[in-house]
């Protein structure tokens, strides 16, 4: 069944071409886009089942390994494929509902659907890539599409924010490409399975330089402090569905690249302490920025930065328990963070703004919207028994088991960050939902169509389902962590 492996990349690319040809027929574009993402989700779920018996490997074009490009569908890659496909499908349905209600000024369909599918192809290619250069290609595909999506509508604010986003992304791409060149010059290959043996044979100083270059590039893409200043200024200006999918997925591709390279290529390196320091600073600085915000979009953008620190915490520990908790928390955070940004779009329609001083009374006037915000907010804050609590508990237990001074500092930082997240989201609840509405609230708010509310509700249910299925999902994350740290299953699948 290895012929299924390229389909999550090929189908969105073919769908993008088809929607571009149908640019004069928006209804056909919608049908094609939704059908492609449904098929991608189905194939990804089937690959997840198949990967339980070992990684599935495809040599693209029939070129022998390691000369050609290799796609590898192991448990980590397929798990990320399933979650990303589900999220992109829900966001697409939300955007279709928004376009049907407001017209196409915000998201011109002739541009949006092809670009959105190309971005999806870039994400899936990055997850399945078995060599560093193809990983770079995946990043560039999704970034090229994101440059278009973040500036949709062509307003001055979006162009300004998009310019910052483009400059930072190009900088990280240059660093990544330079790192790839150094890796090839040092080892003569970019195939990750082959790099496992060749990197181990390099001098420690050379390995440190290569590892540092890749971490720097991925750290910018993942918005790790102090490389995260661009994110809160860029994401909030885009349309709600674009912001949601950026927040949920794009930074996680950077985190995925860090997990993959740190466990497969540079295990047991000397940068673990550096990663944990970066995790602690990302948590604390991000959440302090969130507490200081008076706009929901910027507040959520800072919480996004802050919670990347949790993911980096597990990677820095480099233990099976830490990696397992980081994988589980990544899946949780993709769903919950996307949901909150979609809910914010609904709040903006209902209240006419996302500024907290202009909102109020939504719990009484829009009770469904209140529930849609309340559940993922509790989940993000880590209130028991939600999946956010379970993921943070796993990270804290892994930190306690590590026992170092730095890990104990991170345990304390995790607890403080979780409490401040609860404070920030409780402030949003009190001001936007609980208090009496101010005079600035519009008398005739825009109604949210069912095609916007339904995908948001589906993601809320999905976030709750992660809690209900936490046992099997955490066991799967532990299995993923074991395979990542063993490295042997991956290498033997690619180089039998």
Image (spheres, rainbow, N blue to C red):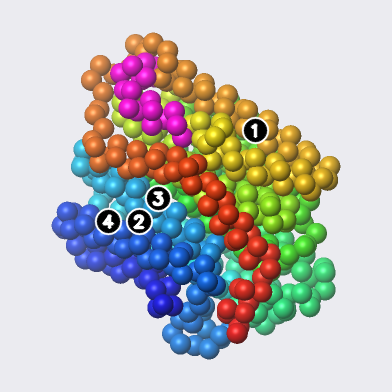
Circle 4 crowding by C-alpha within 10 Å: few under 14, some 14–19, many from 20 = many
Residue 34 is marked as 4
Which numbered disc, 2 or 1, marks the residue that appears first in the sequence?
2
Residue in front for this viewpoint, 122 or 313: 313
* Rendered residue at 73%/75% (across/down): 199
- Residue 148 left/right relative to 170: left
Up/down of 455 relative to 60, above or below: above
Which numbered disc, 1 or 3, marks the residue that appears first in the sequence?
3
In this rendering, the label closer to the viewer, 2 or 1? 1
In this rendering, the label closer to the viewer, 3 or 2? 3
Q: In which quarter of the image is the N terminus?
A: bottom left
| Magenta part, dominant SS | helix
Residue 258 figure quarter = bottom right
Per the image, is 373 magenta? yes
Q: What stretch is highlighted in magenta?
A: 357-376
Per the image, is 396 magenta? no
Up/down of 25 relative to 451, above or below: below
Q: Where is residue 111 in the image (x, y as percent from the top left)?
A: 29, 55
Q: Which residue is the site of mark 3?
A: 87
Circle 1 SS class: helix
Q: Which residue is the site of mark 2?
A: 116
The Cα–Cα distance between marks 4 and 3, rounded to whole angstroms, is 12 Å
Residue 50 is marked as none
Residue 417 is marked as 1
Q: Position of residue 96 (x, y in %)?
A: 26, 46
The Cα–Cα distance between marks 1 and 3, rounded to whole angstroms, is 26 Å
Residue in front for this viewpoint, 229 or 131: 131
């Amino acid at each position: 069944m290895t012929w299924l492996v390229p389909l999550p990349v090929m189908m969105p690319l073919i769908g993008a071409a088809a929607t571009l040809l149908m640019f004069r027929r928006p209804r056909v574009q919608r049908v094609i886009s939704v059908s492609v993402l449904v098929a991608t989700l189905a194939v990804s779920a089937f690959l997840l089942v198949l990967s339980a018996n070992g990684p599935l490997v495809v040599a693209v074009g029939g070129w022998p390994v390691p000369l050609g490009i290799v796609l590898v569908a192991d448990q980590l890659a397929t798990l990320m494929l399933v979650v990303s496909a589900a999220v992109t499908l829900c966001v697409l349905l939300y955007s279709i509902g928004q376009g049907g209600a407001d017209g196409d000024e915000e998201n011109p369909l002739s541009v949006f659907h092809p670009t959105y599918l190309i971005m999806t192809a870039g994400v899936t290619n990055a997850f399945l890539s078995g060599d560093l250069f193809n990983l770079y290609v995946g990043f560039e595909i999704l970034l090229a599409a994101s440059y278009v999506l973040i500036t949709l509508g062509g307003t001055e604010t979006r162009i300004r924010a998009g310019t910052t986003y483009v400059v930072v992304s190009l900088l990280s791409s240059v660093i990544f490409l330079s790192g790839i060149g150094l890796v090839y010059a040092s080892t003569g290959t970019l195939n990750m399975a082959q790099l496992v043996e060749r990197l181990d044979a390099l001098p420690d100083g050379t390995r440190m330089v290569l590892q540092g270059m890749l971490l720097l590039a991925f750290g910018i893409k993942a918005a790790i402090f102090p490389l995260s200043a661009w994110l809160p200024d860029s994401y909030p200006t885009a349309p709600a569905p674009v912001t949601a999918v950026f927040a949920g997925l794009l930074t996680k591709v950077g985190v995925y690249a860090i997990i993959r390279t740190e466990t497969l290529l540079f295990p047991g390196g000397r940068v673990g302490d550096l990663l944990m320091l970066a995790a602690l600073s990302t948590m604390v600085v991000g959440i302090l920025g969130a507490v200081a915000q008076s706009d929901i979009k910027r507040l959520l953008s800072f919480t996004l930065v802050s919670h990347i620190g949790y993911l980096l915490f597990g990677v820095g520990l480099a233990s099976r328990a830490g990696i397992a908790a980081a994988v589980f928390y990544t899946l949780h955070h993709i769903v919950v963070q996307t949901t909150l940004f979609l809910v914010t779009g609904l709040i903006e329609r209902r209240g006419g703004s996302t500024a907290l001083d202009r909102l109020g009374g939504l719990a009484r006037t829009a009770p469904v919207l209140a529930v849609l915000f309340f559940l993922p907010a509790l989940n993000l804050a880590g209130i028991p028994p939600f999946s956010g609590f379970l993921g943070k508990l796993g990270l804290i237990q892994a930190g306690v088991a590590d026992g170092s001074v730095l890990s104990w500092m991170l345990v304390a930082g995790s607890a403080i960050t979780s409490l401040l997240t609860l404070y920030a989201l409780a402030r949003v609840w009190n001001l936007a939902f609980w208090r009496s509405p101010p005079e600035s609230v519009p008398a005739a708010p825009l109604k949210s169509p069912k095609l916007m509310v339904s995908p948001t509700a589906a993601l809320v249910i999905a976030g709750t389902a992660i809690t209900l299925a936490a046992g099997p999902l955490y066991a799967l994350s532990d299995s993923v962590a074991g395979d990542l740290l063993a490295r042997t299953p991956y290498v033997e699948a690619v180089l039998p």
